[in-house]
Image (cartoon, coloured by chain):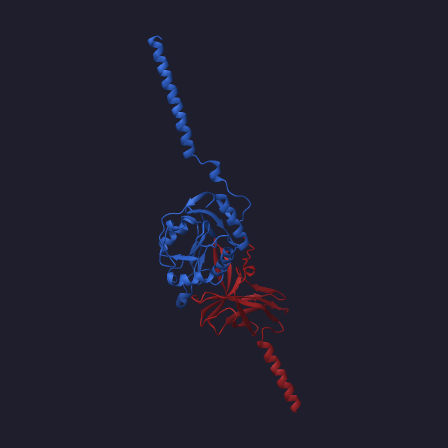
Amino acid sequence: MQPEEKGSVRNFILLASIGILSLVIGIWASQKLLVTNNDTRIPANLDATVLPHARPLTGFSLLDKNNQPFTPQQLNGHWSFLFFGFTNCPDVCPTTLKVMQAVWATLPTKKGEPGHPQLYFVSVDPDRDNSQNLKPYVEFFNPEFNAVTGKLNEIDKLTNQIGILYGYDEKDGDKDKDYIVNHSAQIILVDPKGRMRAVISPPHIAKTIAANFQTIQTFYGD
Amino acid sequence: MRTVSIIKLIFCSVIFFTTTVQATESVKVTNAWSPEAPSVTKVMAGYMQIHNNSDKDIKIISAKSPLFDRVEIHLTKMKNGMMSMIKQKNLNIPAHKIVELKPGGLHMMLMGRKQEIKSGSTIAVTLTFDNGENINVTLNVKEARQEELHHHHHHHM
């Protein structure tokens, strides 16, 4: 070969290598960076509203019924049902807990078994609720159920991410201890990676919730 | 003369009796119950059907129970995305209609429980109407069954 031709061949090989390398890097990058169809598929025909993109829950610090920390870490490793209320609630909260008690009765798994979910009743009324009364309250419905509360600003860190609203009716003079707390009644389903995955709006019917949960759990896996 | 006295006595007893039972000529209360609640809370709910068999609307203006400090009637309603409990100053029972107190809707809120109340026992409540009638209602305390616990929401956000 002539020296000039050797140079061209070298250039060609160089360009080709760069080209192939770019292609390989490009394919790798697209797999890593772009969301594929599989990530946004959701199961069909559910009453629950499933989020196409699971929303990671971060940065809150509360205490549970045993005064143990309840942080994003505690949501890892299992599906979780979360809902919000207060123990001085005569109608919505006990009724929802009774529905979840019925859901628990239909679960194919037992506590400690893989795939078994957990439930957290979040009290948005820390003035009157704490681990001392939350433990017997929630265990009345099922000894497995957990309840959490904490400082309002920590509660807000959780409710703001989820989109739960709550507020206090005006405290009424000497009937101060009887005030009502208004609160969103959605039940939130969190996946084993601690990400918000679905919203279950009222009316809460145990059979429907149980069936929706099975479908969602099967679809996304443990 | 004695017969007349006896008749008067019987007549008065009957009137007295009918104004204090769970029914009068105009109003009847059926299926009154309360779900057993955790003993750590002092508040319970009351559910029932109130029948107005008369030609006139009547209102419940107050309620009380010897087992509770206070009894109020509230309406559970979705407001601004939140479940709200709206206190009802008076509960209107329209003529020839039935008003139902049930989970997720209208309910009696029994506050300041004075003693332990377990399923199988009863709670006495007196309803006072704007026509001067008093009705004694007996709530049966039960373990709530799932079928009774549907939230009935007839409105959307």
Identify the residue shown where x is 60% and y is 70%.
B28
The single residue placed furthest to the bottom in the displayed view is B1
Image quadrant holding the N terminus of chain A, namely: top left
Up-down: is B136 above or below B47?
below
- The answer to which of B97 and A145 lies nearer the viewer is A145
Q: Position of residue B42 (x, y in %)?
A: 44, 67
> What is the total number of numbered labels drawn onto the structure image?
0
Q: State the image quarter where residue A44 is shown.
A: top right
Residue B103, how many percent across, how many down? 53, 61
Q: Is residue B140 visible?
A: yes
Q: Residue furthest top?
A: A2
Chain drawn red in the picture:
B
Residue lying farthest left?
A3
Residue at 38 percent of width and 16 percent of height: A12
Q: Nearer the viewer, residue A22 or B11?
A: A22
Measured as percent of width and height from the top left, residue A162 is found at: 43, 49
Note whether residue A130 is visible.
no
Chain coloured blue here: A
Q: Quadrant of residue A174?
A: bottom left
